[in-house]
Structure formats: structure tokens, C-alpha cells
Image: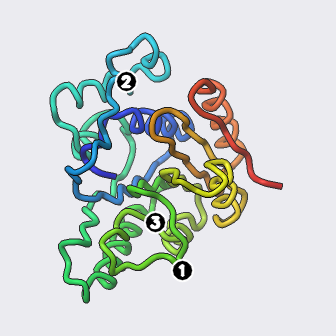
């Protein structure tokens, strides 16, 4: 996650999904907050806010809340936390700024940072992790690399998801075989039976659901039906 993404279309579907599926639950949010990068145009997709007739119907309060944040120029996770976007959530918002650390201390710093996230969210009933890029295998995760701050490795997912539902954001890549093949690959890698919500508009992204109970699945199916023009629910592989 980066502050400059707040309020874009990805944020709208992300928060709408969490609000619909985990309404009333004590939600923990691990932002995996990465410093803003000014070199790319990511986060520019806010034109949906000008088309309220098309988008506001999905979640009026959320639409209005994000519109206010964008309109006032206060795009940041701090603004989200101070708003009613996720009113009962607990946030782990310490920046994951590996690049500011000396290379020799990055691995221990990342470990201490993650320990603080787990401590902050230990009493939450469900956890959402929002890494900038998404999932990475442990074998490909190098905590001393600057780009490691953009990813969540399997070891961190396993620890955060232990004994409770968890949702993880993943930015789809140029995976050989396409996004559906990429989603199937991660469904096989992640623990347990994994549901995936695939959002197809603008920059494609997938939300992976682990340890889902019957109520979560029912709400997830309802959300997917409501948003069927823009995405789809991919059920666990046999």
C-alpha cells in the first residue's frame, strides 16, 4: 500500500469487499505501507468518483467517504483510519521502509516490524494484509532487498492467518498462461481451501480468502454477484 493510492478504484473495491464480507467483525488491517513512489502513474484511477450513477450504488457511504478524502487532497492511510471507511478496524500502520535501513540490518528490522504487526492485530477476528505488489514464495523472498517491502511471503501469511480468516491483496502480473493461471497457482500455494475474488477493471488485482467460514463464503458470493460486471469469484480448486 502507498498513500497515493488512497481513494482510487482499487481502494473502492477493496474497502467495499471488506465492508460487505466482514461487516460487524473486528477487522485487523496490516497496511504494509510503502513510501510513495513518484515515478509511476499508479493511483491515478479516481475518475470513477465523477461517475456516481455507475459506482455509488455499490456502497453509498464508502463512495462518499472516499470522495471526500480525494476531494480535500488528504489521500493517505491516516485519512482512511480517521474516517468511517472501516469504522471498527484495528490498523497496523508502521511504514515498511526497508530502503531507509542499512542493508546489514534489514532482515532483523523486517522481523521486528512484522512482530509488531502481529502484536497489534493479535486480538482481531479477521486480518487483511495489503502489500504493494502482493504474494511471494518464501524461496523468492529476500528481506535485504528494497523491493521486499512490496511483498508478503508465505511465512508471514501463515502466521497472520493462524486460527482465523485472512484476506491478502495481490497485484496480478504477466504470469505465463494469464491471470486465471496465476490465481490457480496461488490457490495451490496458500494454506487450506482458498477463495479468490478477481477484479478485472483497470489494473487487475485479486483478493485471496483463507480460513473462510460459511457466513464469509455466503457474503463473498453475494458480493461477487452484485459486482459481477467488474469481477468474479473463483472458488477453491478440487
- Residue drawn at x 55%, y 38% is 199
- Residue drawn at x 23%, y 44% is 76
Color scheme of the displayed model: rainbow
Q: Nearer the viewer, residue 145 or 215?
A: 145
Disc 1 from disc 3: Cα separation: 12 Å
Helix, strand or loop for disc 2:
helix
Examine the rendering and report whether any part of residue 126 can be seen.
no
Lateral position of residue 124 relative to residue 79, left or right:
right
Q: Nearer the viewer, residue 118 or 201?
A: 201
- Residue drawn at x 42%, y 64% is 151
Helix, strand or loop for disc 3:
strand
Lateral position of residue 192 relative to residue 18, left or right:
right
Q: Which residue is mark 1?
A: 139
Disc 2 from disc 1: Cα separation: 40 Å
Q: Which residue is mark 2?
A: 63
Q: Which residue is mark 3?
A: 152
Q: Position of residue 63 (x, y in %)?
A: 37, 24
Bin the neighbour count of mark 3 within 10 Å (Cα to Cα): few under 14, some 14-19, many 20 and up. many
Please state, as top left, top right, bottom left or bottom right, where the C terminus lies in the image: bottom right
- Tag count: 3
In contact (CB < 8 Å): disc 2 and disc 3:
no
Quadrant of the image occupied by residue 174:
bottom right
For marks 2 and 1, the one nearer the N-term is 2
Disc 2 from disc 3: Cα separation: 28 Å
Disc 1 or disc 3, which is closer to the eye? 1
Disc 2 or disc 1, which is closer to the eye? 1
Disc 2 or disc 3, which is closer to the eye? 3
Helix, strand or loop for disc 1:
helix
Residue that lies at the very extreme toward the top in this rendered image: 53
Q: Position of residue 124 (x, y in %)?
A: 46, 56
Examine the rendering and report whether any part of residue 213 can be seen.
yes
For marks 2 and 3, the one nearer the N-term is 2
Amino acid at each position: 500500500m502507498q498513500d497515493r493510492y488512497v481513494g482510487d478504484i482499487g481502494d473502492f473495491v477493496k474497502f467495499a469487499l471488506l465492508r460487505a464480507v466482514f461487516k460487524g467483525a473486528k477487522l485487523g488491517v496490516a497496511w504494509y505501507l510503502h513510501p510513495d513512489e513518484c515515478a509511476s502513474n499508479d493511483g491515478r484511477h479516481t475518475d470513477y468518483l465523477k461517475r456516481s450513477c455507475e459506482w455509488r450504488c455499490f456502497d453509498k457511504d464508502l463512495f462518499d467517504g472516499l470522495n471526500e478524502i480525494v476531494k480535500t487532497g488528504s489521500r493517505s492511510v491516516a485519512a482512511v483510519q480517521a474516517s468511517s471507511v472501516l469504522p471498527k478496524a484495528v490498523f497496523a500502520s508502521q511504514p515498511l521502509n526497508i530502503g531507509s535501513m542499512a542493508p546489514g540490518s534489514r532482515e532483523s528490522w523486517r522481523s521486528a516490524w512484522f512482530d509488531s504487526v502481529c502484536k497489534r492485530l493479535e486480538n482481531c477476528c479477521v486480518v487483511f494484509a495489503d502489500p504493494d505488489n502482493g504474494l511471494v514464495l518464501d524461496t523468492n523472498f529476500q528481506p535485504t532487498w528494497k523491493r521486499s517491502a512490496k511483498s508478503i511471503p508465505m511465512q508471514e501469511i501463515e502466521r497472520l492467518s493462524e486460527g482465523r480468516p485472512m484476506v491478502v491483496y495481490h497485484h496480478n502480473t504477466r504470469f505465463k498462461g494469464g491471470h486465471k493461471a496465476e490465481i490457480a497457482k496461488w490457490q495451490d500455494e496458500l494454506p487450506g481451501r482458498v477463495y479468490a475474488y478477481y477484479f478485472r477493471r483497470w489494473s487487475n488485482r485479486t483478493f485471496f480468502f483463507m480460513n473462510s467460514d460459511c457466513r464469509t463464503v455466503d457474503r463473498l458470493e453475494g458480493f461477487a454477484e452484485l459486482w459481477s460486471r467488474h469481477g468474479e469469484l473463483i472458488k477453491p480448486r478440487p
